[in-house]
Amino acid sequence: MASRPELDIRTAFDLPPFKSITKILRLENYEASGEIYQYLSDGFARIRETHPAKRSIPLDWPGGPTLHALTSKSSGGYIYPSVIVKYVDNPRRHPVELLNHILNTSSTASSGRPFAELDAIYEIILDPPDVDIPLMKRLLHVIIEITRLPSASRSMVHEDLTHRILSAPNLDEFLSLGEGTTEIILCDLHSVLSVTKDTRRPYIYFHHKCLEDYLCSPERAGNLYQPQADTHFDILTVCFHHMELWNRKLVSPNAHFQSIGITLAYSCPALRHLFWKEQCFPPSVLDFDARIVWRCFALAGVIPASRSILNNFTGGLHNAMVGWIDLF
């Protein structure tokens, strides 16, 4: 079992019968330098053998001194070397140039910050050429908050529903982006997140939680930081958009539910959770017709305790609907 030294876990393992049959290995005291060095050596060897530019890569690249320097910068953890190897293993860029860029940037990183070396790598990776940075920022923060919804709301947003909305095509539809936009914007971020079509895990996810911590820290992320409330309001506005879209369709509810698909199915529980968390709505949706919320909730099979939501709308008949929903 591998875990942080949380109090509850430590307490459980200090009691019988676990205490007599377990041994604690404190990773902060474990010397992993040799294993990290070997991990880096094997990773770069694989790149030398498989990269499209392999004929122009020196056989002794990157060399012992560079491997030792990268091992030292890893500070005994595997996240830094893992990100390095994935970043350098880019078939569209020359690996020698990418590694030199990392080494030159890392040499100027401030040693006074605990995550200085890792942050220096993130600054390189999250500034890809010819990419709409504001849109990339929006996508990354929306992914973070959508990923957080299942644990934050328990059964309110089913985990499978979250995974489905986080597939690249569904995220394009949810955010009203052109087909293929999400994959194009995120294609150079393969070293820190996965945009995969693997049927076992066909959704976007971060390789390490460290990237989420970085993006959620104004001191570390700089211009890529976005307050959580801003992302919540962004998602709320998108949810209302899909509800309005459904309401405008002059088709039967069941037929349109099939056509709107995952976007409407996700919008209903997401709206409920985000309202309860923020206790307010963006000004742009305060005059939203409450009847649309009621119809969409009923369509998606969500029976909400929605007095708090409906009372925030100025749309007609909301008082009658509050009374009707209270019967449940």
Image (cartoon, grey):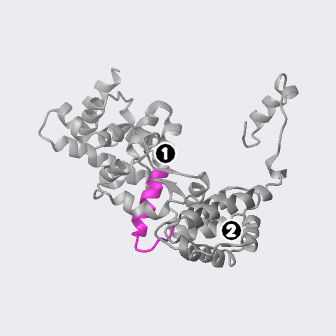
Say what amino acid the circle numbered 2 marks: Ala
Q: Is residue 148 left or right of residue 247?
A: right
Q: Which residue is mark 2?
A: 116
Task: List x then y, in percent, for residue 77.
Answer: 72, 56
Q: Amino acid at mark 1?
A: Thr
Residue 177 is drawn in which quadrant? bottom left
Q: Is residue 129 in the magenta section? A: yes
| Nearest to the observer: residue 265 or residue 69 | 69
| As drawn, 32 above or below 203 | below
Q: Which residue is mark 1?
A: 147
21 vs 257: above or below:
above
Can I make out residue 287 in this image?
A: no
Please say if 38 is above or below 238: below
Residues in magenta, as a range: 126-144
Disc 1 and disc 2: Cα gap in Å? Answer: 26 Å
Q: Point out residue 229 in the picture as x, y percentages from the top left corner.
A: 47, 53
* Residue 270 shows in the view: yes
